[in-house]
Image (spheres, rainbow, N blue to C red):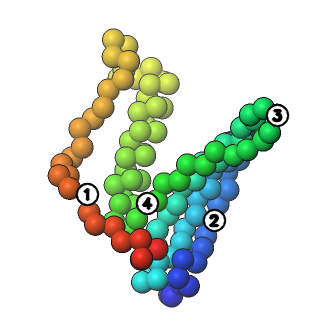
Amino acid sequence: MEYDRNSEVYSKVVRAGKRTYFFDVKSTKSNDLYLTLTESKKTTVDGRESYQKHKLFLYKEDFEKFQNGLADALDMIQSIKNGESYDSNHSRFIEKEEESVDEFPEVSFDDL
C-alpha cells in the first residue's frame, strides 16, 4: 500500500483532564510508517490560555522495543500498586538496557 508523502494515515486523540495526547501514524516519502506522540497541556498565564506541546517521533525500527519497554513499565506500575515484588527501601530502580548503543544512528529528516 502506498501513502502520500507525510500523509497522516491514522490519528487517535485521548483527552485526560488538562492534557490531550495525540497518536498520529504518518508515512515518509519512501512509504515507511512512523508514529508521533504529542502531549498538549493547557496552561493559563496572566489570564491568557495557551498550550504547551511535547512531541516524540517513533520510527519503525524502534516500534517493538518501545512497545516492550512501555509494557514492562506499565506492568511494573501495576505490580507496585498491587504490593508485589517492590522493595520499599528503594524509591526507584532502573533496569539496564539489553544492548549498549555507543552512537546514535543517522536520521534524515528528508525522509519525513
Tags 4 and 2 touching, CB below 8 Å: no
Tags 1 and 2 touching, CB below 8 Å: no
User: Which of the two marks, 1 or 2, is nearer to us in this view?
Assistant: 1
Which residue is the site of mark 4?
A: 58
Tag 2 secondary structure: strand
Which residue is the site of mark 2?
A: 11
For marks 4 and 1 on the same chain, the one whose residue lies earlier in the sequence? 4
Q: Position of residue 103 (x, y in %)?
A: 20, 56
User: Which of the two marks, 4 or 1, is nearer to us in this view?
Assistant: 1
Q: Nearer the viewer, residue 25 or 106?
A: 106
Find residue 106 and report its image quarter: bottom left
Q: Position of residue 64 (x, y in %)?
A: 36, 59
Q: Residue furthest right?
A: 47
Which residue is the site of mark 3?
A: 47
Q: CA distance from mark 3 to mark 2?
A: 31 Å
Tags 4 and 1 touching, CB below 8 Å: no
Q: Position of residue 65 (x, y in %)?
A: 34, 55
Which residue is the site of mark 1?
A: 104
Label 2 Cα neighbours within 10 Å, binned few <14 / some 14-19 / many ≥20: few
Q: CA distance from mark 3 to mark 4?
A: 35 Å
For marks 4 and 2 on the same chain, the one whose residue lies earlier in the sequence? 2
